[in-house]
Every structure is written in C-alpha cells, then in structure tokens.
Amino acid sequence: MIDRELCRASGMQYILDELGPLTPFGEELCRRPELYRDADELRAELRRVRTLMEYDGLAAFTRELDRPLMCMKDIRGSLGRCAAGGTLSLLELFEMKGLLLALAEIVPVYRAHGPLEGLSFSDSSPALALLDPRGERRRSFAIEDAATPVLFELRRRKRDVEAELYKTQDEARRAALRLERESICAGEDAEERAICASLSAGLRPYCAAIAADCAAVGRLDLLLRKAAMGARWGAVTPEIREGDIAFEEMTNPAIGASVAEHGGRFVPVSITLSRGAAVITGANMGGKTVALKTLALNVLLAMAGYPVCARAGALPPIGGICFLSGDAERTEKGLSSFGGEVVRLRDALRAHRDDSLLLLDEPGRGTNPDEGAAIVRGMVEYLNECGGFAVVATHYDGVAERAGRHYRIVGLRDMDAEQVKRELAASSMPGPEIIARHMDYGLYPCRPSDACPREALDICRLLGMPENVMERIERFY
C-alpha cells in the first residue's frame, strides 16, 4: 500500500477522498491504493481507464450502473463461511439474495456497453434461482410455506392453533394451546434451519465465483471513478515505457484548490528527468516544494493506474517513491532536527534503487549553510551516478553543476514590481500573500552551471525592509 504520509503530502489523498466509489469493494480499493509491480498489468489497467474516458456513452453507462452498485453489500464473510461448510442464517440469505439481484442488474448493463479488457463476470443466475425460485426479483427474502411438506404442515397447524387461541376464553385450554404452539414453533425453527442448510449447500459451489464477481464489481466501480476523475481535472492516461520521466503541464488539484481559495492560480509544471539527479533551484517562497509535490502526485497516480493531472505524461515503471522534507525531525528518538534529517537521508539513500524516485526538499538546511551546501553537493554527485531517478530542491549554490539536469523556478523573473508595490500599498492583505499571487511557480530548464536565482533581496525590498537595513544588506551582496 502507498505510504499514508506520502499520500497526504503529495495531494493524492485529496483526489482519493473526492472519488466517491459506490460499493464497499470499490471503497476498499480506493482506501488502500497499491503501486503496480508488473508493467504489463499497469498498462492493461491504464488501457481500461482510457477506454472508459474515450467512451461516448460513459455518462449513460455510469447512470445505469449507479443504482445497483449502491445496493451492493459486503458479504464476503458470509461467502467464506458458506464455502467452508457453514450454514447461512436467514439474514445472511437475505443479504446474499440482494447482492445476487444487484449482480443480475450490473452484468447485463456492463456487457451491453462492451466489456473491458481483463474484467469479466460469471453467470450467477443459478445461485439466484435458489433464493428466488419464482423469478420475482423482489428484494425481500423469506422461506415459503411450500418449501417442504413438513414446513407447510407445521405452519398450517400453527395458524390453526393461533386462531383458536385468539377465540377461546378458557384459561386451561389457552395454556394447552400455548404449549402446543411452542412445540410447533420449535419444529418450525428446526425445519427452517434444515432448509437454510440445504440452501447453503446449494450455494456452496457458487461462492468462489460470487466472491470473484464482488472483486470485479469493485474494480469496475473504481474504474468508473477514475474515468470521472479524468473529466473533472483534465487528466490523461500516461504512457508506460522505458526512458525518461516526462510530464507536460502537470497540476496538483489539492494545491490548486488551496491557491484558488486565496485568489491565486496554479501554474502548471513541466519536467523531464533522466536517470541520475536533477536539481530545482529557486528562492524560498519560490514553489520548489510545490513542484516536488506535483511530481510525486503524478508519478503516484500513474503507477497506481490512475490518469495523471497533466497535458501529457510518460515514464518507465517506478517501483518506489520516497519524498523527504529537509526539516524532518526524529525527536521521539532523542535526535536533534539535523540528526533526524541525517537518519532519514541515510535510510533513503540506502534504499534508492534503479527503479525508484527520490525527492529531496531542501536537504541540509538543518545545519549551517556552508556545511549544508557541502552535504547536498556530495549527495547530488552520488545520486547523479546512481541508476534511479532523483530530484533535489535547493537554494544552495554549486549544487546544480553536479547534477544531470537543472531547473529553475520562474519566480519573480517576469513580475511587474511597480504593480506589486501599488497592490501592497492599497491592500490590507498580508504582503507575502500578495507577492505569492504574482509568483510564477513554473519550471524552466537551464544549464547546470547557472547560479541559483537571488530573489530574497527583491522580496525584502517589496515587503518594506527599512532602507538603512537594505543598504547594509546590498553591501554584503
């Protein structure tokens, strides 16, 4: 299962929470997403998603399935007991009938709209016939009087006794009738248990197929939600192939929603990664963390068989994703902030493989800048010689030149400084929020030898740092 913290930090949990599967089987798949380990299985899943996303009749297909999907109940426990030789209760038989009726609606609709590759259902009509012998398709379930001659006679006698009990006023006779009714009810219960045992034995050969159908329903339910996700967020199915990781105009719905709440606009991120290390540079406030989270989200989506939130995406199979923030602490083990960071970096570097993606957000900032820069340069040089993919976000100088690729955050490069000053003077909104609205968080490729952008001075000036302080700062620059 995908690490819960990575799911939350990347924004994938936001997407999963918005999907809304209708069945308990689909909810379970959504709640516990897994990365595909087999590339062919992943490609097959993405083909299924793409087929649905491109299907003109998807809206009608979804509408026809929604009601029976909502009627599905998780009875896998009952199926397991029945398969193991247990006897189902009347309540369990009622739930079994409801599930089989829902399947009887789902399967014809699914087949009529064209089955998806690798997703099929069994014929459960013989099992349904055991619980609905008249073919009335009613949701209720009861053992009929005519189920067996013995039951028919017991219930006839019970009705007669109850009718006489209702009429008679003689207390001695009423007492005798009550005893007779108890005896009849005991016999009725025993006969009903025998019938339940017989029905359970009749259902037993179908239990494995019904359980497989439940799993198929869960997959179909989730596939429909994946297709709807594609329409909602303009997502596309990525290409899984060997080579670079490449995304064009990635977005992150979780971050986008937060930015929109503050009147901003999410700037799409494009990136291409070769094996080795890439470095993203930019000033603080510049969106390096946003770029890393957006990349992590879309790689997770791709490897879990979801559409990616991008205009286009292609990547090789990725077996593991690790995302570390530079300010992580391990205080629960008595380590300092920097000590905790070193432990996490050590573990991540040891676990880095040919098929993994390692994302490091501002590593080394827990110590002094000279030592931090040296540590990050060494790590980037090492990662650039490894077979896997790594991206390091930093504002340290001399790091990018040791990487295979270098990206900069656009930041304040194209900002209209005078316009920002006017907004800062006229607005009661906090200054950093106004600057953030003018910040361009997009990436642009540059040479590894290019120095980190120096926008901190501009930010200090825009936010009204005293002029006599600014003069001294500029002298040290």
Image (cartoon, rainbow, N blue to C red):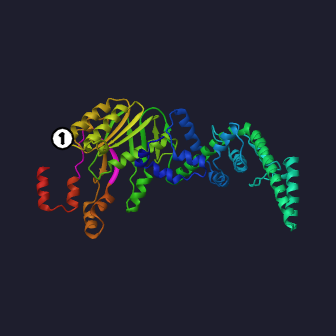
Horizontal arrangement in the rendering, residue 274 relative to residue 154 (left or right) = left
Horizontal arrangement in the rendering, residue 288 relative to residue 135 (left or right) = left
Horizontal arrangement in the rendering, residue 174 relative to residue 448 (left or right) = right
Residue 68 image offset from top left, x and y in percent: 68, 52
Residue 444 image offset from top left, x and y in percent: 33, 45
> Residue 416 falls in which quadrant of the image?
bottom left
Whether residue 447 is visible, yes or no, is no
Of 15 and 6, nearer the camera is: 6
Horizontal arrangement in the rendering, residue 298 relative to residue 148 (left or right) = left
Q: Which residue is mark 1?
A: 370
> Residue 458 falls in which quadrant of the image?
bottom left
Q: Is residue 250 above or below residue 206?
A: below
Magenta residues, start to end: 440-455
Q: Secondary structure at mark 1?
A: helix
The amino acid pointed to by label 1 is: Asp
Of 201 and 149, nearer the camera is: 149
Of 388 and 417, nearer the camera is: 388
* Residue located at (46% from left, 32% from top): 242
Whether residue 379 is visible, yes or no, is yes
> Residue 354 falls in which quadrant of the image?
top left
Q: Is residue 346 magenta?
A: no
Of 101 and 390, nearer the camera is: 101
Residue 461 image offset from top left, x and y in percent: 20, 59
Q: Is residue 452 magenta?
A: yes
* Residue located at (22% from left, 53% from top): 456
